[in-house]
Image (cartoon, rainbow, N blue to C red):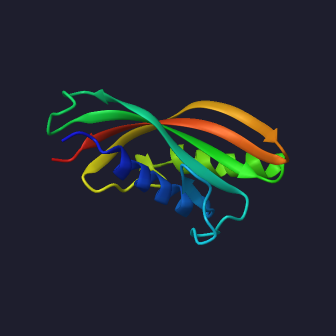
Amino acid sequence: MPVSGRILSLAVQTMLASATGRSCGYGVAPTASSLPTGAATPYSVLYPIGSTSDGPPFGDVSADARILYQVTSVATTAEQAEWMADKVRAAMVARAGTGYTYPIVASGYAVMSRELDKEEGVAVTSGVYSYIQRFALEVTTLA
C-alpha cells in the first residue's frame, strides 16, 4: 500500500497544534474556529511539498516514503515569528529517550525519522512576519 500523503499531513497538523499550543492550518491560515487558538497570531501553516518512494517498490504492501513539509510560522512581529518557529522546530525534531517528544500518530503508518531540511528565517510582507522551515519525514507502512 502506498503511503497516503493526506493521512500523514493531517497527523502532522494535529501534532503541531498540540505540541505548540497554537493553531496550525493545512495549506491555508487557520480559521476562527480552529483549535486551539483560532486565527490569532502567531500560528503556523503546514504545506505538503512532495514525497518520494523509498525502500520497497512504491506499490509494495510495506512501502516507505520520504515526505517533505514546509511549515510557515506567521506573526505580527519578528520576535513572535521566531518564537513560533522555535516551537515548531522543537515539535518536529525534539527527542525524548529513544523516540520523539511529540509523536506523529497516523493510522497504518510509522514515522521512522524526522529532520530539519532547511530554514529561510524571518521575512516581512505588508507588516506580516513569517518564518519558513522545511522538514523531511521518513515513513513506512504497518502491514
Is residue 94 visible in this depiction of the protein?
A: no
94 or 96: nearer the eye? 94
Q: Residue at x 81, y 54 (%)?
A: 76
Viewer-closest of 81 and 30: 30
**Above or below 19: residue 140:** above
Q: Quadrant of the N terminus?
A: top left
Residue plotted at (63% across, 62% down)? 22
Q: Tell me where residue 129 appears, x and y as whole percent.
A: 78, 46
Q: Is residue 28 left or right of residue 108?
A: right
Residue at 78% in and 37% down? 123
Residue 33: percent from left, percent from top: 59, 72
User: Residue 3 occupies which quadrant of the picture?
Assistant: top left
Given the current orientation, which residue lies at the most extreme bottom position? 33
Q: How many marks?
A: 0
Residue 113, position in %: x, y?
40, 38
Residue 26 shows in the view: yes
**Percent position (x, y) of residue 109?**
28, 48
Image-based side of 62 in relation to 93, left or right: left
Q: Quadrant of residue 10?
A: bottom left
Q: Residue at x 57, y 57 (%)?
A: 24
Q: In the rendered view, would you say 23 is above or below 95?
A: below
